[in-house]
Image: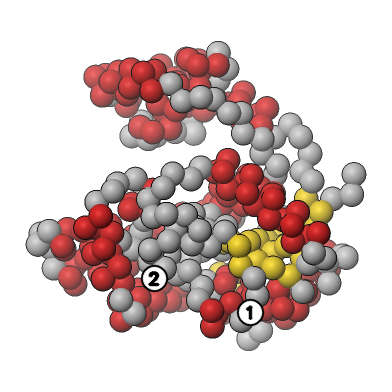
Amino acid sequence: MKKQKIICVVGPTASGKTALGVTMARYLDGEVISADSMQIYRDMHIASAAPDISETEGVPHHLVEFLPYGSTFTVADYVKIAREKIAEIALRGKMPIIVGGTGLYINSLVNNVEFIQNDTDIELRESITKEYELVGGAEMLKRLREIDPETADKLHENDKRRIIRAFEIYESTGMTKSFNDEMSIKNESPYSACMIGVTYRDRELLYERINRRVDIMLENGLLDEAKAAYQKNIGGGAVQAIGHKEFFDYFKGEISLECATENLKRSTRRYAKRQLTWFNKDTRIKWIYKDETDDAAAVAINYVKEEGNYA
């Protein structure tokens, strides 16, 4: 089977993925598909750092700001729609370029994860949740280890949502989550992916960029955007996004604006660290360090050429 070629531009927040993706799309006659779990939502343009018209430079961008704020959107939803967009772009004779920092989205798409759909049993979930609250995370994780040690070894006792989900899968299907995950990647991927990562060798330089970007976001109206989210008080999804929730205590009068701003900077730095930890596990990624080159785009294009038949 001839595989569809795609390019993935990944990395931590504030590393310059958007600009690099646009440059590559212009060079390779491509279109961009976002892989950012927050840029999918409307009404958080500033907090999610969604690209505006001047940044996209006329390059079509897909899966950006297309969902109502706070609506539910799963990894399975992303993979399904992203696959459709890849096919549409390829049919137009363009190069699909996936750009974003949500590692789970990218991994699931590139590795052709097939999600086993299970209808949500609300009563079952509530029952497991009550049990968790009654006996505690440590005991629930101990019980999970008896039926699914592989999954249990990956979880912390405070990871309530994933522990409950593991029991939910087992109780509703008779399969462990680890077996479910194994079955989900049994099919070969239809994609040949050239994966490029962009970051900074000196982590402090990345953190400085994050701090500066938060300041710029505030200058551009982030506080008003966050206040609108706070007033909606709709819960779930995007409401919990980094960039809004850090200001909720300020709106309540419990902390100062300075404190809220510092909380946002700290949360974003920690998020960037988690992103790097995730991506560093993928040996397919060819890394570009912005503090070691004056032309990241040229390096990226060379990587693409080395992969063959991309450029």
Give the SS element for disc 2: loop
- Check disc 1: other Cα within 10 Å, few if <14, some if 14-19, many if 20+: few
From the viewer's perspective, is 249 left or right of 282? Answer: left
Q: Nearer the viewer, residue 247 or 74?
A: 74
Residue furthest bottom in the image: 294
Is residue 74 visible in this depiction of the protein?
A: yes
Q: Does 91 sit above or below residue 22?
A: above
Q: Amino acid at mark 1?
A: Gly
Residue at position x 63%, y 86% in the image: 294
Q: Does 123 sit above or below residue 64?
A: above
Count up the numbered dots.
Answer: 2
Image mark for residue 46: 2
Q: Amino acid at mark 2?
A: Ile
Q: Does 170 sit above or below residue 71?
A: above
Q: Does 137 sit above or below residue 23?
A: above
Q: Quadrant of the C terminus?
A: bottom right
From the viewer's perspective, is 182 left or right of 259? Answer: right
**Alpha-carbon span between mark 1 and mark 2:** 20 Å
Q: Nearer the viewer, mark 1 or mark 2?
A: 1
Percent position (x, y) of residue 150? 55, 26
Label 1, on which residue? 58
